[in-house]
Image (cartoon, rainbow, N blue to C red):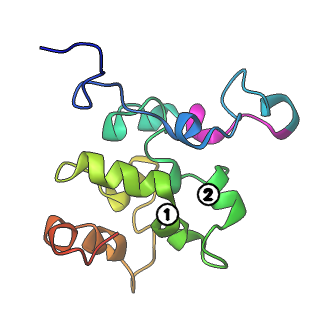
């Protein structure tokens, strides 16, 4: 067996600050000037989707790169749909991805997107949609 190449099945999962190279993790290049990102410190999300702190659930946290920049334009709850890191986590974790509504419930939000949109992102990320190419 050739061991010169890392096995993609056993390589450590990257957290958002590693993937995005934002420098806002503790000790990062931009932490002193822009502050440490909440994803790098949120203990309630430690282990979610195999990450450290909120590092693989950053889309659920206000105060992160995605939520601060509203990457999708004007709707912060849609920012994740356009994020390469989010899409990477979805691909890596399906079908065991911890759904966004469950992540938000860990943070204390009972109905995070309001009554008319409860679970909309979960539905988009369902294994059936992921297999058909219709989701996230």
Q: Examine the rendered structure and indicate whether residue 104 appears above or below residue 10.
A: below
**Gap between marks 2 and 1, in whole Å?**
7 Å
Q: Which of the 4 image quarters holds residue 66?
A: bottom right
Instruction: Decide if residue 60 is on the left or right side of residue 111.
Output: right
Q: How many marks?
A: 2
Q: Which mark is residue 3?
A: none
Range of residues picked out in magenta: 34-41
Is there a contact, CB below 8 Å, between mark 2 and mark 1?
Answer: yes
Quadrant containing the C terminus is bottom left
Judge the density around disc 2: few (<14), some (14-19), many (≥20) Cα neighbours within 10 Å.
many
Q: Secondary structure at mark 1?
A: helix
Reply yes or no: does residue 17 show up in magenta: no
User: Where is mark 2, residue-wise?
Assistant: 66
Instruction: Decide if residue 114 is on the left or right side of residue 17.
Output: left
Reply yes or no: does residue 39 show up in magenta: yes
Judge the density around disc 1: few (<14), some (14-19), many (≥20) Cα neighbours within 10 Å.
many
Quadrant containing the N terminus is top left
User: Where is mark 1, residue-wise?
Assistant: 80
Choose the circle earlier in sequence order: 2 or 1. Answer: 2
Q: How far across and down, in percent of the image, does residue 9 sit?
A: 21, 31
């Amino acid at each position: 067996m050739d061991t010169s190449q890392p096995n993609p099945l056993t390589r450590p999962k990257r957290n958002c600050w590693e993937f995005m190279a934002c420098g806002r993790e503790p000790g990062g290049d931009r932490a002193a000037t822009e502050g440490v990102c909440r994803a790098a410190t949120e203990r309630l999300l430690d282990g979610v989707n195999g990450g450290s702190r909120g590092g693989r659930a950053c889309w659920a946290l206000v105060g992160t790169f995605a939520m601060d920049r509203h990457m999708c334009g004007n709707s912060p709850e849609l920012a994740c749909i356009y994020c390469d890191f989010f899409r990477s986590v979805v691909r890596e974790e399906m079908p065991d991805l911890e759904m966004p509504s469950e992540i938000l419930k860990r943070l204390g939000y009972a109905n995070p997107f309001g009554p008319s949109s409860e679970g909309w992102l979960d539905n988009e990320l369902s294994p059936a949609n992921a297999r058909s190419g219709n989701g996230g």
